[in-house]
Amino acid sequence: MANLKEIRQRITSVKSTRQITSAMKMVSAAKLKKAQDAITQIRPYASRLHEVIRQVSGAINDKNISPLTVLRDPEKVLMVVIAANRGLCGGFNANIAKAVIEWVNGQYPVQKGKGHVDLIFIGKKGGEILKSKGWGIWPYLNELIDKPTFVKTETIAESLMQQFTDNKYDRIDLIYNQFKNAASQTLAVERFLPVESVDGSTGSKTQPFFIFEPDLEYLVKTLIPEALKVQLYKALLDSVASEHGARMTAMHQATDNATDMIRNLTLDYNKARQAAITNELIEIVAGVESLKY
C-alpha cells in the first residue's frame, strides 16, 4: 500500500481535476442552452423549406432553370465535415472521423481510388484524427464553430454552389452530428448538391399539385440558393449544440469518476493511517513489555 504522503498528493491532484471538469461542465451547460435554443428555433423552418424545395425541384421540366438541380454521375465528390475545434467531448470527433471513412469507402470507393474525393473541415479535430490515419490535409474553416453566424455560413454555401455549378464537383455531401438531446447525438449524412427532388431525382417531370406564385422559374432561382444556405447553417447549429451536449455529458461523467476516485483514495488513506497508528501502538506496547524484564 502506498504511504500516506503519496495518497494525500493523489487526493489533492484528483480534487483539482474535479474542479476543472466541474467548471467545464457548467460552462458547457450554459453554452448548450443557447445552442439548443438556436437549433430548436431554426429546425422547423429549415425542414419545411427543404420540403418546399424538393416539391419545387420535382416540378422542373427545364433543367436549365437551375444548374443546382442537375444530377450528374459523381466523378468528383466533396465532403463537408462538421466537427469541433476542441476535444474533451467524448467520442464526438472520433465518431465523425469514423463515419467519414465508412461513408467514403462505402459510397465512393471508385472515386476515392482515383483521388477524386475531397474533404473540407469545419472544426479542426475531425481533420486531425483523419490526418493521423493517413487521409491527407484539407482546408479548415475553424472560425465558424466558435461563433456560428448566418453571414459567414452564407459565404461558404455560395462558394460550394459555385464549385458545383462550375463542375468542379458532381456531388457535395454534408456529414455532422444531429442534436437529439444533451446525452445523445445522431450522425447524419445529407446530400447538399445537387438538390434532391420529391421523387429522389433531379429535373424530373413530376406535375405540381399547387399553383406557383410568382412563376416557377423565379421561385427556383431565388429559393434554392436560400434553402441551401439555411441547410448548411442548420447543420452547423446542430453540430455546435451536439458538441456542447457531448462535452457536458463527458465532463459530468469525469466529475463523477473523480468523486468516486477521491472516495476510494480517502478510504485507502484512512486504512493506511489506521495501520500506521496500530503499528505505533504495537511498538509502544512491545517497548513497555520489554522494560518489565
Image: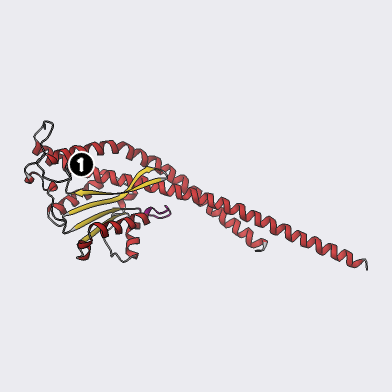
Per the image, is 88 magenta? yes
Q: How is the image coloured?
A: secondary structure
- Please tell me which residue lies in front, 17 or 70: 70
Q: Is residue 196 left or right of residue 4?
A: left
In this rendering, is residue 121 above or below 30?
Answer: below
Q: Is residue 152 left or right of residue 201?
A: right
Quarter residue 31 falls in: top left
- Quadrant of image for the N terminus: bottom right
Per the image, is 150 magenta? no
Where does label 1 land, which residue?
A: 227
- Quick one: label 1, few (<14), some, or many (20+) residues within 10 Å? many
Residue under the point 22% across and 59% down:
108
Residue under the point 89% across and 65% down:
289
In this rendering, is residue 221 above or below 21?
Answer: above
- Please tell me which residue lies in front, 53 or 230: 53
Query: Residue 142: horizontal and vertical position, in percent?
Result: 31, 54
**In terms of secondary structure, what is the magenta stretch mainly?**
loop
Query: Residue 97: horizontal and vertical position, in percent?
Result: 33, 57
Query: Residue 278: horizontal and vertical position, in percent?
Result: 77, 59
Residue under the point 36% across and 55% down:
95
Quarter residue 182 falls in: top left
- Quadrant of image for the C terminus: bottom right
Mark 1 element type: helix
Q: Is residue 20 left or right of residue 80?
A: right
Query: Residue 82: horizontal and vertical position, in percent?
Result: 30, 52
Given the current orientation, which residue lies at the most extreme right position? 293
Quarter residue 277 falls in: bottom right
Over which residues does the magenta segment extend? 83-92
Give the amino acid type for the residue marked by disc 1 in the picture: Ala
Residue 37 visible in the picture: yes
